[in-house]
Each structure stands twice: as structure tokens, then as C-alpha cells.
Image (spheres, rainbow, N blue to C red):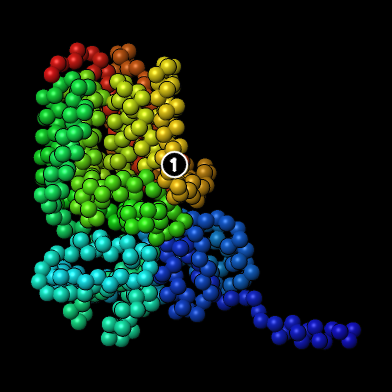
Amino acid sequence: MKWLPPIIILLLLLPSATASTVVLSSDQDEGIARYLANHLNATLVVIPWGSEDERYLEEIRVLNPDELIIVGGPYAVPPLFEVGNFKRYGGKDRVETAKIILRDFFNLDNPETIVLYPSREEVKEFTGKGGEWELVPANTSVALRWAPLIENELPAGEGERRVFIGNVENNPAMNAMWPGELPEVYSLYPSIIVANGTLFITGTDQNLPLIGRYFEGNTRFERTDLVVFLSLLAFLTLVSLPFVNDRRWLGASFLVVTLFVLYNIHAFRLAWDTLFVYMDGALSLLSSGTYETVVGSRGFPGLSYALLVAFKLFGVRIEAAVLYQILLLFITALALHLHFKRGPLSTMALLLFLALPLFREYVLTVSTELTFIALLLLSLALLRRLPLVASLPSALASIVRAQALLLPVVALMRRERKVLFYSALSLALYALLYSLAGNGFEGYVVEISAKGLTAQTVLSNLSFYLPSIVKYIPIPAVLLMYFSLRGELKPGETLVLGVVYLLLPLLWVAQDERYLLPGLLLLLLAALEPLDRTEKPVEG
């Protein structure tokens, strides 16, 4: 037993594997989590957003913490990691999560007064005067690609003015310019600071795109923008005119859209909390030719490629995204006139769409919804007239939202040769676009698998969506029931897809009313289709 005392002494001398406190977060909340870990002298563990990889769980078990602090909601850090003595701090998005951490650990009850220092109004007054701006971005890829968008949103004027983008750790020029150490709290999420006649745009790379909130109201359309916009709209309209039965009512629909846009021109806005991945992906494609986002584990490149086209047409400015959204609204009106033979019915469908609060919300907010809906409606309309041509918008819609792949499958119900060719070509074009895009589509798989499909998931989603369904479904439901009792309802792609898209959100990992929108619109369209068959088309 002579060997026993030395071994005991050796074991006592070995460092303990136990960490008193571990802070766990996804890469999306890394900035605030790292700040918290430094504050608590804790060990930081960062996982890809939504990952359920058990190697990270094993890493936590090896650390054997007395306390586990989870930063982020259950989608960012799945319940799998809720082990031991844990407590979760998470909000609806990364900004709210940061505010919760500031409140609970730093006794800061009103973080906005710190983040927007000295004040939003003072910053806007400073930038509103204009100047000859010199931008000095940090040496990170995110800062470098966002710099052109920021520069284009700053109004021109007299006098040289400097703008630093980044923070004291990744922007040496900012570090040298700042009259002292940049307060750590500013690195939690973006701040725009005016000091010494200089504009400092600070924050972590994960959250840098949120600075767009300062510029989203500065929509200044130039004459060249409107010329390009009108030329593109005129081209699309002329190509479609041979297939529109009543051109007078198409003009009426375009007038409705024009009045709607003019009335709401200041309401068109950018949803930066949700859009930043798409916008950042588009800027990455523009600057380097490759798809990259600030949140590496999530990718939704479909809308990023669409915004890339908008940047190419209108320049790297917020106005490009707004004009893109307005163009989609006109394309939606055009698709309705291609879908119905009767012009008045097409215009009525457009008015019903605009009367739906949920539709108006996502017309005014740049998001995936209107892109997906416009391409889907165009595919359905062309499927009746030019099936092979319809395969292109179907493939594009599938790139934006994978759910559009259901249309080529549902269309096979017709058992027609030309529809068979449409379905095959749609899937082939999708595969081609998918391969050309290269990467990023794993984001869809990550979102679907993040929470897993369980009975509890379906019941939770049902309780969330049911009030909205009851609120919006009466008009299409009554019309569908009426035509069904009269024997005039013939199930087709529109009706089948409407039902499927209305049920799909019950299986989705995130709960958001907007996921109901495609299903509601398609059901409304299906409810109007019998009216198109009971009357002869009006010749234009």
C-alpha cells in the first residue's frame, strides 16, 4: 500500500474540473453572453443557434457547474441543455434578451437610455445636417459589407465628418480616436454615439445590422430609381397583356395599388429584427460573391438573392428594398388578373387582400411573405395558361420558401402531360438554383428540427393560431360552403394548397401569425374561383 499516499496527494493537487458558474448561449447572443460571463467570472460555452449536438451537452457535464445560466430562448438554446441547477434568461429576440441580462445582472432598468446615448434625436440632428462623410469600418467582414449601406444613407452636405463602425477591439482607428476606453456596455448591441464631432456606430458583429433602425425612415427616392422601377413594371405588364382578358380592370387594379402606395409611402418600413439575415446575406453576395450571414448556423438565402437583384437595380440603399416590395405588390395585382378571366373579380380579390390587416402588415414590412405570395400566385396563374413558363416562378418561390415545392406535387392531380412536364421542370430548376446558391439552405432544416415535432408542439401551436384562424377564416369559409352546397366547388390546386398551408404552421417550430397568411389568401382565392366559372369572360 506504499503507492496509495502518493496517488492521494497527486489527486489532491490536480485542478478540479468543476466550474462554479457556466454561461451557455447560442452564437446569436454571444456578445451579451460573453459580457455576462466576464462579469460573473464564469465559463462561457457557445453553441450554434438551435443546435442539439450532444457534444456541447457533454462539455457542460464535464464542467459540472454549480449554476448554469442559459442566455436565449428555447429555440436558440433548446430545452435539451436544461440540466442541473439552471436558469434561463431569454426574450423574444436578441435585443430583448440583452435588456433582460442588463436588468437582472447589472441593475439597469432602462437600457435604452444607455444604448441610444446621447439620444436618438441628437444623432438624427447630427446626421441630418449632412456632410462629406469618411467611413472607417472595422476589420471584420460584417462591418466592411455594411459600411456601403450606411454611407449611402447618410445625407450629403458641407464639411468633413468621420464615421467609425465597429468597436475598440476590432477597429484600431476607433480605439485611437476614442478619448478613453469605450464603455463595455456599448458592445452589447448596436449603439450610435455622437462625440467630438464624430459618429461612432458600435456593437458586436452579430447585431450590427440592427443600426438600420436609424435609417429606415430616410426613404429618399431619386428620379433614376423611379425610371428604373417604371421601366421594369412596364416591361412585365407588356409581356403579360396578351393573357389578360380585361385590360381596363387591370388598369383599375394598378390605380388601386398606386393610391395604396402613395397613401402609405411613409409607412413602408423594414423589419430589421427579422430581415437582418436576408439583408446581410445580400450584402455579402454583393461584396464577396459568397453567401454569408452574421449568424453562421442560420441561413435563408432565397430573399437574400432577391434583395441582391434589388441592390443591382437601385443601388445599395434602403430605398432598393422598399422599391422591391412595392414592385411585388404590383406583380401580385398582375398575377390576380392572370388567374381570373373576369377583370372585376381580379380587382375585387385585390381589394379583399388589402382589406386583410395581416396582408397589409406584411406589404408594408419587407419580409419573405410578399415575395413568397407573389411568386406563388404567379405560378398558379401561369399553370393554367403556360405550364412550362410557370415552372420558373415556382422554382423561385421554392428557393424563398421550401413549402412552395408542394405546388408541383399537388398539380399532378390533373394527370395531364403538360402538367407533368411543369412539375418535372419546376423541380429541376429548383435543384439547379439550389446548387448555384451553394449553401445556406440548411437553415430551413435547423428551424424545423430545432424543437422537434411532438404532440405538445401541435397542441401549443393550435392554441396559438386558433384565435387568428377564427378571426380571418369566416369569409372564405362561408363562400366555400355556399358553392359546395350548390355543387359548383371543384377542388383544385388553389384550394388544396390553401388548406395545407393553413395547417402547416401547426407543425412549425416558431409561432408567428404571418405563417397563416399564404393559406388564408389561397382559401380566399379558391372561394372566388367559382364566380369566375359562372360568368363569361369580358373581352378587353
Q: For the point 21% across and 33% down, which residue is it?
A: 236
Q: Is residue 341 above or below residue 258?
A: above
Q: Is residue 26 above or below residue 106?
A: above
Residue 400 visible in the shown view: yes
Tell me the kind of residue under disc 1.
Tyr
Q: For the point 66% across and 81% down, which residue is it?
A: 15
Asked if residue 363 lies left or right of residue 131, the reply is right
Residue 479 visible in the shown view: no
Q: Give the residue number, with chain letter if any, for mark 1.
A: 434
Q: Position of residue 401 (x, y in %)?
A: 39, 41
Q: Position of residue 255 (x, y in %)?
A: 10, 34
Asked if residue 6 lies left or right of residue 71, the reply is right
Q: For the point 33% across and 27% down, which residue is it?
A: 389
| Mark 1 Cα-neighbour bin, 10 Å: few <14, some 14–19, many ≥20 | some
Q: Position of residue 493 (x, y in %)?
A: 37, 24
Nearest to the observer: residue 211 or residue 45: 211
Residue located farthest toward the right when viewing the structure as drawn? 1
Q: Is residue 441 above or below residue 416?
A: below
| Among the 4 quarters of the image, the one containing residue 59 | bottom right
| Among the 4 quarters of the image, the one containing residue 283 | bottom left
Pick the quarter of the image with the C terminus.
top left
Q: How many marks?
A: 1
Pick the quarter of the image with the N terminus.
bottom right
Nearest to the observer: residue 16 or residue 375: 375
Disc 1, SS: helix
Nearest to the observer: residue 226 or residue 328: 226
Asked if residue 281 lies left or right of residue 347, the reply is right
Q: For the point 22% across and 53% down, which residue is it?
A: 315
Q: Position of residue 527 (x, y in %)?
A: 28, 24
